[in-house]
Image (tube, rainbow, N blue to C red):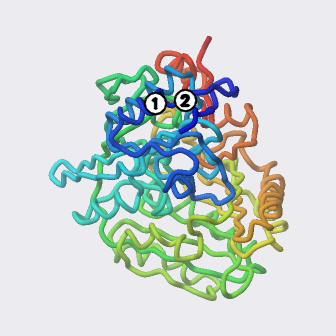
Amino acid sequence: MADLRITTTRGTDTVLDEATVQGFKSSVRGPLLRPGDAGYDAARKLYNGMIDRHPALIVRCAGVADVIAAVNFARAHDLLVAVRGGGHSVPGFSMCDGGLVVDLSAMRSVRVDPVRRTARAEGGATWADFDHETQAFGLASTGGIASTTGIAGVTLGGGIGYLNRKYGLACDNLISADVVTADGRLLTASATENSDLFWALRGGGGNFGVVTSFTYQIHPVGPVLAGFVLWPLERAKEVLRFYREFSLAAPDELRLDAILGTSPLGPSVAIITCWCGPIEEGERVLGPLRAFGPPALDTIAAVPYKTIQTLLESMGYVPGQLDYWKSSFFKELSAAAIDAIVATVHPAPTPLCAVAIEHVGGAISRVAPTDTAFSHRHAQHSFLAVGVAVDPADAGAVTAWSRKQWEAARPYLEEGVYVNYLAEDEGAARVRSAYGVNYERLTAIKAKYDPGNLFRHNQNIQPTA
């Protein structure tokens, strides 16, 4: 085969001779793919169909040794690196153009210890993988709100999910992580080993290395009261004012998300519920919500926890669609904020476009902002404009729509943003706001573990000079 042209960390091209590439291939157990190879095009596909990137090499790691070999090879040749876990990164950081992709998607094992109530999961696992194993024992931990999401990206960015008000963020349940750092070492990060790295991993994103496994605290979670209640969009203002008061007074066991979008009944406002406490008590707590209006549709029922984890897929949000998101945290879900959101949400360019108001607070807010790298502990609600298209011809329209929703809500939003919802094109100031008051400490830890910024294809934290 011909010599390989590949992109460096500086954005320039270099050429690797065939012997060098073959030497790398022989050092790993998993496949090493390049353009034209069988499986290459499938391997570069991500959750977000708007991302169409063509790396020079994809190494589909079979284990930790392959990850170490890939990191050492990238560092030795100064290569642009992307790290793929579940491949759900909406900005597309799981894939790069011209560089090397370290692909963990074959590393998906999950081992549960039901006595200690812990679970160890490899870095390529999704929440579907994780929930399948933990729910066999009636246990769970806070995960992403879509089963197809990778555990790695969710956890490293903080980890908002349906159990977050009762059990905290995904990162709050992290006990330890195994990390291949930029110098090719495998380190364990925990409260007692490499504690500075452990702190940074809990909200600092993929800036500090390739996490090959995560160990979580897991909790008893049986059937949950989950589903949604729905009203026509013309009632959105009164519904959202009720939602504001009801959600602020809610027990920790209850998460409530408000969604403005399109349903089979037309333009609608819905409130998605997940109650993770005793079912009889949940029926009582949810009574006022289910009676308000009354709603046009009520699907709330006692269901397995895995059902709420797949709710978004059942509503039509599946891999391969074209996504563009804009997000921040609310200063306060005020009447003026509600009016601004409702005024711009309809019409939308596609039926899958929606504005979500996510319910945080609870256990999240009882952790200090500097205890983990995730600093946005005071927020009670987040704002997320989700532009989604099926037809590539609608990609520009859904992007413009999402930006319009965010601009309408912007006077009522914090500068801070959940890093996992941050788009790729938002600029350095917004990246810094995603890390909040912890940014300076993160730059120092970055300098310790990745001084050359090998892991830069992310919402990047620049190492201290």
Q: Any mark on residue 53, and which? A: none
2 or 1: tag closer to the N-terminus: 1
Q: Any mark on residue 455, and which? A: 2
Residue 364 shows in this picture:
no
At which x and y percent is residue 440?
60, 21
Name which residue type carries label 1: Gly
At which x and y percent is residue 118?
25, 48
Q: Are marks 2 and 1 in contact (CB under 8 Å)?
A: yes
Mark 1, other Cα within 10 Å: few <14 / some 14–19 / many ≥20 = many
**Residue 319 in which image quadrant:** bottom right
Q: Is residue 320 above or below residue 233?
A: above
For image coordinates 46% across by 30% down, the residue present is 209
For image coordinates 56% across by 18% down, the residue present is 452
Mark 2, other Cα within 10 Å: few <14 / some 14–19 / many ≥20 = many
At which x and y percent is residue 238?
72, 74
**Callout 2 secondary element:** loop
At which x and y percent is residue 462?
62, 23
Q: Is residue 277 left or right of residue 426?
A: left
In the picture as drawn, the residue positioned furthest to the left comes out as 115
For image coordinates 53% across by 52% down, the residue present is 40
**Callout 1 secondary element:** loop
Name which residue type carries label 2: Phe
Residue 257 shows in this picture:
yes
Q: Which residue is mark 1?
A: 209
**Residue 381 in which image quadrant:** bottom right
In this view of the protein, which residue sits in the foreground, 169 or 397? 397
Cα gap from disc 2 to disc 1, whole angstroms:
7 Å
For image coordinates 74% across by 48% down, the residue present is 413
Q: Is residue 60 above or below residue 375?
A: below
